Image (cartoon, grey):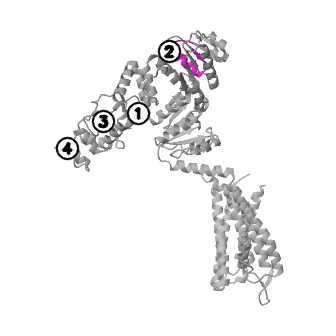
Amino acid sequence: MRNNSLYLIIKRMRTPIYVLILTFSISILGMVLIPGVDNEGNVYHLKFFDAFYFVSYMATTIGFGESPYEFTYPQKLWVGFCIYLTVIGWFYALGSIISLIQDKVLAAQIALAQFQRKIKKMDEPFIIFVGYNSMAKAIIDRLTHDGIRSVVIEKNEEKIKMLALENYSIEVPALAGDIRDPHVFRMAGIHKHNCKAVVSLFNDDVMNLHVALSAKLMNKNVTVIVEATEEEYAQNLKTIGADIVENPFKIIAKRIYLSLKSPSLLMLEQWVYGDPLVLRKKDKLPLEGKYIVCGYGRMGTALEVGLKRAGIDYIFIEASPKKAAKAKRGEKVIVGDADDKKILLRADVQEASCIIAATKDDLLNLSIIMAAKRINPDIYTVARENRINDAVVFKAARIDRIITIETLMVKKTYNIIARPLTDRFIRLMKYRGEEWGRHVVDILKERISNNPDTMETVIDDEHAYALVEHLTATEEETPYEILYRRRDDYTKRNRLVILYIRRGEEEILLPDDSLPIKVGDEVLFAGDKESFEDVEYIMENINELCYVLNGKECQLSFVGKLLFSGKDG
Amino acid sequence: MNLEKVISGFFIILALTMNFGFFYGDPTVLEQHNRYELFVAIIVNLIATIYKLGDKTHLGAVLLATSLVADIQLIAAASVWALGEYVTGLNIETVTAIVSLSGGALLANIVSVILFTGDVLKSKR
């Protein structure tokens, strides 16, 4: 497979080389056979070497003149014929080489060979993205910022050309190929041990299932992250061992539920996904009154669960009778176009408190919102935005809450890959309830600011050299409290909160200050840039660690072990 | 019948026979070895080499190797001849060098033909 381009060149060049050999041998033979006359008038024959020498410079149009003696007319006649013969041979060969360079098949083969070389040389962890869409692009963008490498497999060559123009700070190798061919997966390096995850965010659930299945079969250690919007596919994916199955609609439904029942948890979740830690007035969904949900598709059914759990009165409008027929008995579903005024009136839009436009058509969603607002200007509007590109129009429509599915998927996938602790934290906090959520929000706001950052780290040699040295050298317990201390004044507290610690199987949310540090802990911090810097210094630098521990500078800093053993004496 | 097989077989065997024709004779007497025969042997060997190029099988690779050996030996023989004629003069030493070089090429060509026939016999139809 590797040397295909070379074989292609050889195969294509065979005929031109035959032509060259033949024209040369005919010319040489003729030159040897035709008699000439030397300076004294004797008849002589060119030797093979003379003929070879002469033809070589004649054919290449270098032309050193006639040698060894001036040619007779019969010889000149033959040379005249040979010039055209050999020059045509040369030009034919040159032309073949040039057309070969421009050949698309060869170019594809060379690109493939380059791709394989890049994959082979890659020794840091990398993520394979199947399909290069706007979501994949946004995720790759964020990952390259964090220094995580990505590889793309995409069917459409035009999209790969677009990728090449993207200017990522780390190179993103891309392969043009159909994922249904198992070879393609292999070429992208799925069998390599440093292939950490495969991400497949197709709109098509079947495609995602296919990717997950082949990825898991080819390398069972790889994490498979796929999107599944329908329950039966989600079940299938789980049985074949896909590690993370994402359903954007479930996330949306959960958020709607959270904003109705526990706004603090919603605030935390939105904060983790990148929003500030505040709840604006327009973020608050009306708690009373009737909800109209337009679209009883994948999102509609997910919302149904969330709204029912929150105890909200709701009604659906669905254009397709087939989808509407799927509704369980007792569900109120009106069949008809949701942007039709009559249908909206039938759903009592003038008295409803909230309308959710949840169809998969962005334009339809917009026109639903516009129509509903015209009848009831006070209604709270929620719209589903399917494509990131439509953001400008949605912004202009002054909708209270826009749910962008693609952005949601991008943030979620990014968190799973690059911030696993954060992702786990969101999952765990949901079981704690509103009260706990408010407590966390209060702590974060009080100790840090309205928009803290997060940082994930591991207490190990690589990330916390000094701390690990200290922990192994001294037997005494060191509490997490020392990480809160400031580098310039250890009595003061940094703007920092430890949100979550994973210690093997054990998981600790909001750990106590006195909790002892153990090697191997994975820690999620919230704080600001400066405090993160302090924490990193304290963990990695023996001097800094020594200072925050004892409140004074240490001597003998260059011998870490001596320092710690001699500290007490 | 595959025309390409006919042509490649033709050139491979012709390379051997021409080579033998040149090699046959008293190795110390240059008059018994025809210069035209050496010329044709070189050309035919080159063509046979090109035919063997681009075959991805293991056998194809070995065939190509034998052909390359024959080419190098024959071209070396021709170079020694030209050197002897124009520079050092044709003494017995040079003449034997020419003939024995072509003898080496002959061996390579024999191996090539054996491999080729073996491959043909192996593919039962």
**Label at residue A164:** none
Which chain hosts label 1? A
Q: For the residues marked 3 and 2, what is the alpha-carbon distance in whole angstroms? A: 42 Å
In the rendered image of this protein, does residue A158 appear above or below residue A383?
A: below
Residue A101 is drawn in which quadrant?
A: bottom right
Which chain does tag 2 point to? A
Q: Is residue A452 magenta?
A: no
Q: Secondary structure at mark 3?
A: helix
Give the Cα distance between marks 1 and 3: 16 Å
Q: Please tell me which of labels 2 and 4 falls first in the chain.
A: 2
**Dot 4: few (<14), some (14–19), or many (≥20) neighbours within 10 Å?**
few
The alpha-carbon separation of the residues under discs 4 and 1 comes to 36 Å
- Which of discs 2 and 4 lies nearer the camera? The answer is 2
Secondary structure beneath disc 2?
loop
For the residues labelled 3 and 2, say whether their Cβ atoms are less than 8 Å apart.
Answer: no
Which residue is label 1 attached to?
A453
Callout 4: residue from which chain? Answer: A
Q: Chain of mark 3?
A: A
- Earlier along the polypeptide chain: callout 2 or callout 1? 2
The answer to whether A397 appears left or right of B109 in the picture is left
Look at the numbered discs 4 and 3 and tell me whether their residues touch, using CB distance below 8 Å.
Answer: no
Q: Which residue is mark 2?
A: A286
Looking at the picture, which amino acid does disc 4 mark? Lys
Q: What residue sits right under mark 4 in the picture?
A: A567
Residue bearing the label numbered 3: A483
**Dot 4 or dot 3, earlier in sequence:** 3
Secondary structure of the residue carrying tag 1 is: strand
Residue A300 on the magenta segment: yes
Name which residue type carries label 3.
Answer: Leu
Residue A345 location in percent, x, y? 63, 11
Label whose residue precedes the other's in the sequence (1 or 3): 1
